[in-house]
Amino acid sequence: MVDVVATLSGYYGGARRDPGERFTLPDSVWRDEKRRPKWVRLAKAGEKGLPQPAERKAPARAAEPGSPAEPAKPAGNGVQEALGGPAPDWLAPDLLTSSPPGG
């Protein structure tokens, strides 16, 4: 495996890589100039790049006084509750044969 640093934004390994981000490439990809990303360079020994996406942490937010630490989450995904229930997956037979209003 070869340690590289992104010089520009790009996609590799199913993830977006930001400039300065350090990640690894297989030796076979690094040796093949057609497959090697043009936007990477070899990482220097001891060089620290940006943390990997899995290592990045959101900045900690201080809770406001009197507010719960976690906001209340709705049951389900919130869409059905906001719409008043699930959408029907069928139409009643009398609705299929009725004429539109005013007609």
Image (cartoon, rainbow, N blue to C red):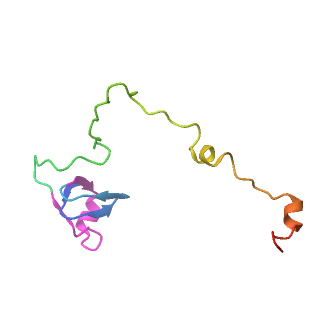
Q: Is residue 1 visible?
A: no
Task: Write down the quadrant of residue 75 in the picture.
Answer: top right
Q: Quadrant of the C terminus?
A: bottom right
Can you say whether 34 is above or below 11 in the image?
below
All told, the count of numbered labels is 0
- Could you tell me which residue is drawn at 70 percent across and 52 percent down? 87
16, 86: nearer the viewer:
86
Is 69 magenta? The answer is no
Q: Position of residue 11 (x, y in %)?
A: 32, 63
Q: Is residue 20 left or right of residue 92?
A: left
Task: Write down the quadrant of residue 71 in the picture.
Answer: top left
Q: Is residue 54 left or right of residue 76?
A: left
- Could you tell me which residue is drawn at 10 percent across and 46 percent down? 46
Q: Is residue 8 left or right of residue 95?
A: left
Query: Most extreme residue toward the front, as rendered?
Result: 102
Q: Position of residue 84 (x, y in %)?
A: 66, 46
Q: Position of residue 4 (x, y in %)?
A: 20, 57
- Could you tell me which residue is drawn at 40 percent across and 27 percent down? 68
Query: Most extreme residue toward the top, as rendered?
Result: 66
Q: Is residue 82 visible?
A: yes
15, 85: nearer the viewer:
85
Can you say whether 39 is above or below 77 in the image?
below
32, 54: nearer the viewer:
54
Is 35 magenta? The answer is yes
- Could you tell me which residue is drawn at 26 percent across and 67 percent down? 37
Q: Position of residue 62 (x, y in %)?
A: 28, 31
**Region rendered in magenta:** 21-42
